[in-house]
Image: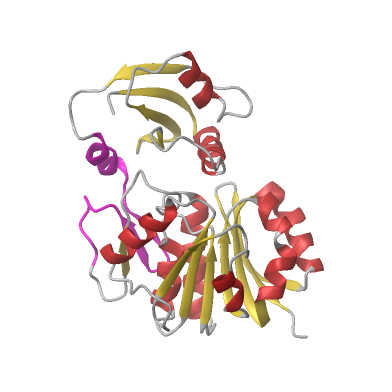
Amino acid sequence: MSWKLVAFAPKPIIQAALATHEAIDEWDPEVIITGSEITDERPNDWVLEAYFQHKPGKADTVLVASLFTDGAPKLAAEKLPDTDWVTETQKQVEPIRAGRFYVHTPDHEPDWSEDVIDFSIPAAQAFGTGQHATTAGCLEMLDTMKQRGVVVRNLADIGTGTGLLAFAGLTLWPGAKAIASDVDPICEPVVVENALLNSIPLGTAPGSLAMVVAEGMDDALLAGRAPYDLIIANILAGPLIELAGDFADAVAPRGSILLAGLLETQEPAVRAAYRTAGFRLAARLVNGEWSVLWLRRRSI
């Protein structure tokens, strides 16, 4: 990459733009989008950077500006020095802790402490590196579920992105059958690469992870493995509402579903859809503006 477009704005605005970007199925994979705080001393001041292989023109500026739903901040083009921009970007992604989980890029040292679950996830890939509040919130809630005695023998991660949440579930319940899916085909090689990096077994046997490309539950292997003790779905509020019935059909009685990708303001509509589908709230947490919901299916 030789150029980038840069926009400065408060944290919620940049995070909303990042969420919009992740929801676009046909985004040009050669245009890399990142977002981060500017300094530790100014945690609410963030920067969005869009990397290009060419000098960005008007169409490129309009494309990046379209990520901001209420009007884009000023976008400035900068020429990059001759350097490995992927490595430099990864160095800017600080590790995160969520529950017992420690997630970092390969440029950071792992934490091999006995009570820590360590994952290395390269930046600038599919959604789900742990940096977004929804992913971190899911990790924290998964840890809470394990500590409260939830037993999972069969799990699915819908909209897996990098595979991180599926890895977390399989690590907490190592004997489980696990499957991950995403509508974006680019996620399949990303998940395979990350699984190898983190010593996550791949395959269809218990204790290993299968990966499929699918929309919702529309896949023979995904549907055939139901009912699930746990479904993880870190996507967006609209698809979560649309999939409530399908998820209800796929979750075992008294089974769990972990929902994320919804703003706190969208939580009532999502909870109403799942209440109608036969779920009750077990726990919730709010991370920034984002809600994470643990629901359990009622007994039949």
x%, y% of residue 93? 32, 44
Count of numbered labels shown in the rendering: 0
Q: Is residue 208 left or right of residue 141?
A: left
User: Magenta stretch containing residue 65, yes or no?
Assistant: no
Q: Is residue 64 left or right of residue 36?
A: right
Q: How is the image coloured?
A: secondary structure
Residue located farthest toward the left when viewing the structure as drawn: 82
The one nearer the camera, 298 or 217, is: 217
Residue located farthest toward the front when viewing the structure as drawn: 220
x%, y% of residue 85? 25, 34
x%, y% of residue 101? 37, 65
Image position of 149 with respect to 183: above or below? below
The one nearer the camera, 51 or 10, is: 51
In the rendered view of the protein, which quadrant contains the N terminus? Answer: top left
x%, y% of residue 78? 32, 18
Q: Is residue 118 left or right of residue 12?
A: left
Name which residue lies at 45% across and 34% down.
Answer: 28
Name which residue lies at 52% across and 66% down.
Answer: 157
Name which residue lies at 64% across and 26% down.
Answer: 70
Magenta residues (range): 85-111
User: Magenta stretch containing residue 110, yes or no?
Assistant: yes
Image position of 44 with respect to 178: above or below? above
Name which residue lies at 33% across and 74% down.
Answer: 201
